[in-house]
Image (cartoon, coloured by chain):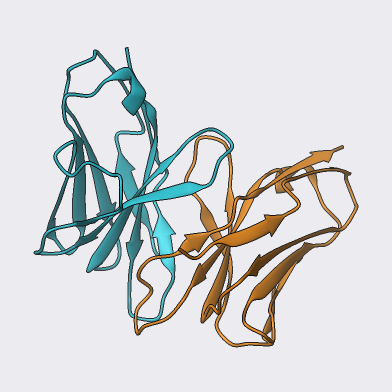
Amino acid sequence: GAVVSQHPSRVICKSGTSVKIECRSLDFQATTMFWYRQFPKQSLMLMATSNEGSKATYEQGVEKDKFLINHASLTLSTLTVTSAHPEDSSFYICSAEGQRGQPQHFGDGTRLSIL
Amino acid sequence: GQQLNQSPQSMFIQEGEDVSMNCTSSSIFNTWLWYKQEPGEGPVLLIALYKAGELTSNGRLTAQFGITRKDSFLNISASIPSDVGIYFCAGFAGGTSYGKLTFGQGTILTVHP
């Protein structure tokens, strides 16, 4: 089945650090990838939609300069949290839309902890 | 924006019991998806529903796409401890590709041995 790999699975870093999270579709090409943020015991909150070769579309209230998204190839999208602060600590999950007509498949998430 | 109302928010059941959860919407969806998420992991697709009235099974799981296209339910029969997790419904409103999904709030399932 469709596999989405997300790396790293956990990051702990100091306030002010920039953190890059990678999302890869391993066995299919993903023209569209999605980035979500999730707080404990809550639903997934869509942050942005990432299309290969074009600028990401951010949801209302998400700072595009804070959360930089790059989708340089059909199998890789990256999310960079710039100058991270403790309030950015969260669980970040990516998903990829594979072949047309197939549902999104999710990565295993990245637990980001900013000290 | 579109919202999905998922209920119940949580369930505490004994092993062997059947479970039922549902999602309703004020607007129509063309596709309903059910995902399960375990702690520290991403959601895993359980069942995808594409047509109104469709009833689909995946092992002990059964899900249906409501006739009105505004609701869906998921049943789990003969629950086992490994069914523990958060179950999310998700809907896609339209278009030729999946695009943005709308998620329910999730149902936290606890199964006591």
Which hue is chain B drawn in? orange
Query: Where residue A104 appears, x then y in whole percent?
Result: 41, 65
Q: Is residue A114 above or below residue B82?
A: above
Q: Is residue B82 above or below residue A73?
A: above
Q: Is residue A74 above or below residue B81?
A: below
Quadrant of res B109 = top right
In the rendered image, the quadrant that contains the N terminus of chain B is bottom left
In this rendering, would B55 be left or right of B35?
A: right
Q: Is residue A93 visible?
A: yes
In the rendered image, the quadrant that contains the C terminus of chain B is top right
Query: Where residue B9 appears, x then y in whole percent?
Result: 72, 47
In this rendering, would B73 be left or right of A110?
A: right
Chain in cyan on the image: A
Q: Residue at x 17, y 64 (%)?
A: A74
Q: Residue at x 72, y 69 (%)?
A: B73
Quadrant of res A98 = bottom left
Query: Where residue A105 appears, x then y in whole percent?
Result: 42, 60
Q: Residue at x 20, y 60 (%)?
A: A75
Q: Residue at x 35, y 23 (%)?
A: A87
Q: Nearer the viewer, residue B65 or A78?
A: B65
In this rendering, would B33 be left or right of A98?
A: right
Q: Is residue B58 visible?
A: no
Q: Nearer the viewer, residue B6 or B74?
A: B6
Query: Where residue B19 appears, x then y in whole percent?
Result: 82, 57
Q: Nearer the viewer, residue B53 or A95?
A: B53
Q: Nearer the viewer, residue A104 or A88?
A: A88
In this rendering, would B78 be left or right of A31?
A: right
